[in-house]
Amino acid sequence: MKQLYITSVRDFEKNTMGTVEAREVPMPEPADDEIRVKIIYSSICGSDTHTLTGHLGEFEETTKAMLPMPFGHEVSGIIDKASPKAEALDYHAGDKVVANYAKYCYACDNCRSGHENLCTNVQFCMNGFAEYAVYHVTQIHKLPEEYDLQTAALIEPLTIALAAAEQANISYGKSVAIMGAGGLGLMLVQLARLAGASVVTVFDLVEEKCELAKKLGADFAFDPREDGVVEKAIAAAGGMYDCVLEGTGVVSAAETALQLLARNGDGVYFAMYGKDPILKVNLHNDFYWNQKHLHGVIMGAGLFPKAIKMARRLDLKSLIQRVHPLSQYEKAFEDLYTKKFAKVVIKMDE
């Protein structure tokens, strides 16, 4: 079977992006408590982009040491082979499923207290850009029979968007600012609307993404490079923002997010950042006087069932702006590097 590997990361001296290569590998066999999934769609994640564009920060040397490296974790598919233990738990060949790339131990204190995203012994299964992949039964989530598998490939990132929205405490009447109109940012636009936000403002460098954000429910969209953009955004909302969510991974955007945040507001940072990702804060003004609350997000604890149900309330189809067959995977990554598209998806079962 075919599987994609990252074979190099960005070379800044040569000004070249990372490279991806298709390789023939043996068909994986599921163990007694595992399931083999025929991958139908695999979506390119922002973290994949960081790996290929070289903005890895402290992870750079570790990543280089792992090359060539399998990757991909936003997947949907059909169970191809279920072990006897999996069948006993009502997982059967032919079931539509999505997979959580994180395999939790369910034995540490974090797992046992409902914070499995902080699992002490977590293992990551980065094998989604393959025709077939094997997962532990606890990583598999079944879908209703009528579920669309293309949009189901966005269930995993939707768990992140849900986690960020919950950390931001979005609710009726609150104003919301979102840094970045990529896949997660556009999900957050819709979640904010569903949660009753009074104003939703988006910031992005790409005009087409800003227009899509407005189509999906944003009231305002700004290019962060505009002169006086912070003041313009605050004026548009009638004041500073109750909830600000930063998903670009750019330090300047992280600083803007803090400037937009109102007193007693909730700021959420859910991106990966590159080298020296230091956010300067004024401890007296930001934390003492203005009582701002800053939150981080890593994955989403127990949110797959909620995301599967909530996906029907969102327009995920509009986020998928490019779909390429596995044989044209190189074109998919060329599209990714343009930064024009919210989500690029590869159809793995040609």
Image (tube, helix red, strand yellow):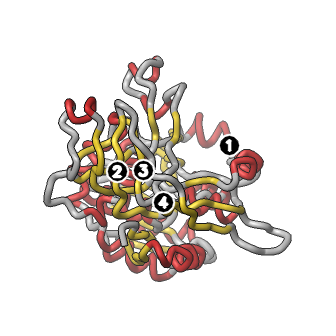
Given the image, on which type of amino acid does mark 2 rest?
Answer: Val
Q: Earlier in the sequence, mark 1 or mark 4?
A: 4
Residue placed most toward the observer, 130 or 229: 130
Q: Nearer the viewer, mark 1 or mark 4?
A: 4
The residue that mark 3 highlights is: 133
Is 20 on the left-hand or right-hand side of 99? Answer: right
Residue placed most toward the observer, 297 or 316: 316
Indicate the secondary structure of the residue bearing disc 4: loop
The residue that mark 1 highlights is: 282
Which label was assigned to residue 37? Answer: 2
CA–CA distance in space, label 2 to label 4: 12 Å
Query: Does the CB distance between marks 2 and 3 fall below 8 Å?
Result: yes
Q: Nearer the viewer, mark 3 or mark 1?
A: 3
Indicate the secondary structure of the residue bearing disc 3: strand
Q: Earlier in the sequence, mark 3 or mark 1?
A: 3
| Residue at the (27%, 67%) spot, across then down | 315
CA–CA distance in space, label 2 to label 3: 5 Å
| Residue at the (18%, 36%) spot, across then down | 90
Residue placed most toward the observer, 298 or 175: 298
The residue that mark 4 highlights is: 129
Given the image, on which type of amino acid does mark 1 rest?
Answer: Asn
